[in-house]
Image (cartoon, grey):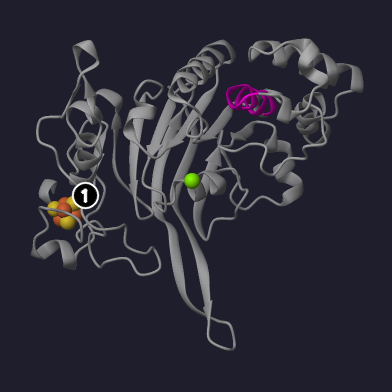
Amino acid sequence: SNVLVDVKEVKKYFPIKGGVLKRTIGHLKAVDDVSFSIYEGETLGIVGESGSGKSTLGRVMLRLLDPTEGKIEFNGTDISHLSRRKLRLHRKDMQMVFQDPFASLNSKMSILELIEEPLIVQTNLSKEERKKKVIDIIEKVGLRAEDSLKYPHEFSGGQRQRISIARALITNPKFVICDEPVSALDVSIQAQVLNLMKDLQDELGLTYLFIAHDLSVVKHISDRVAVMYLGKIVEIADKQSLYENAMHPYTQALLSSIPVVKKHDEVAPTKERMRLTGDLPSPADPPSGCTFRTRCPFAFEQCAREKPPLIEKEKGHYIACHLHA
Ligand code: SF4
Ligand code: MG
């Protein structure tokens, strides 16, 4: 199928200021040379520990942040250098669902006003047309039209996430970035929201980038999964190859920390349990060569010297590790 979003050699470095003169003394390499494509209608999961750069990557892809280097093509248009004015024409096609949607939103707005707002900013629809669309999307996400005059605090966490999904979908986007949309919810509610997102995807023909910090959340919703470590993609593959034949030691470690539930709800440890030791190194001072080497049980001499390139090991299965060169 067609490529909808093409990310090419994207970097996002944040300057680190220091000293009395507050000069730039270094760079935090939040996203460090990342390339991948997202195909129309698919869900690409992106997984990594907090600090791996996945949220920054999502924000750069929507131009909520400007890339330091590289290109983002959306539907064939390079959006990475568009002016704010030209970008506005594309805004409605690309939306984001946040983990904590109401932290930054005005709690004095009714949900009708909250969901309507992107239509006011990003389209030229009349008030009547906007109202009709809001009621329609409220019902699509499983809330009631009569709830539209209530305020966010009158809803449960799961319902609030439905409101934020409605706000993201109100402009009929093609592409939606979901940044840990269920991480703050109870497990039982997580499944409901994930199922809703899957149903909406099928109904509306959406393409998703789904960001999460562990592999279990993205397993059911993703078609392909990318694993990020310190600003780089270390492995990317279709779901089945990734979960059954993970090749990168980091992906293997993440997978072996997922408890496998057996019959009668008994939790069984996976085959070989591999534990990650040590903390994620600082993205301001990443290790030389392979940035995973300080935590990798298989690290050898070459790993400190050379950065492993991301290579296609099997069809559609890419990995960055010297063991597989
Ligand atoms: Fe481990 Fe070396 Fe592979 Fe990095 S390149 S994951 S350190 S074996
Ligand atoms: Mg994050």
Residue 117, quarter of the rendered image = top right
Q: Is residue 67 left or right of residue 120?
A: left
68 relative to 312, above or below:
below
Quadrant holding the N terminus: top left
Q: Residue at x 23, y 59 (%)?
A: 290
Q: Is residue 143 left or right of residue 9?
A: right
Secondary structure beneath dot 1 equals loop
Label 1 beta carbon within 8 A of ligand 1: no
Q: Which one is nearer the viewer's eye here, 10 or 181?
A: 181
Q: Residues within 10 Å of mark 1 (few under 14, many from 20)?
A: some
Q: Residue furthest right?
A: 127
Q: On the image, numbered disc 1 is attached to which residue?
A: 276
The magenta segment is 156-167
Quadrant observed for ligand 1 in the rendered image? bottom left
Look at the image and say whether residue 84 sits in the magenta stretch: no
Residue 324 drawn at (x, y percent) = 13, 46
What amino acid type should be assigned to the residue bearing mark 1?
Answer: Leu
Q: Residue at x 51, y 25 (%)?
A: 207
Q: How many marks?
A: 1
Look at the image and say whether residue 160 sits in the magenta stretch: yes
Q: Is residue 67 left or right of residue 271?
A: right
Q: Main secondary structure of the magenta part?
A: helix
Residue 10 drawn at (x, y percent) = 46, 53
Residue 318, quarter of the rendered image = top left
309 relative to 118, above or below:
below
Q: Which one is nearer the viewer's eye here, 287 or 309?
A: 287
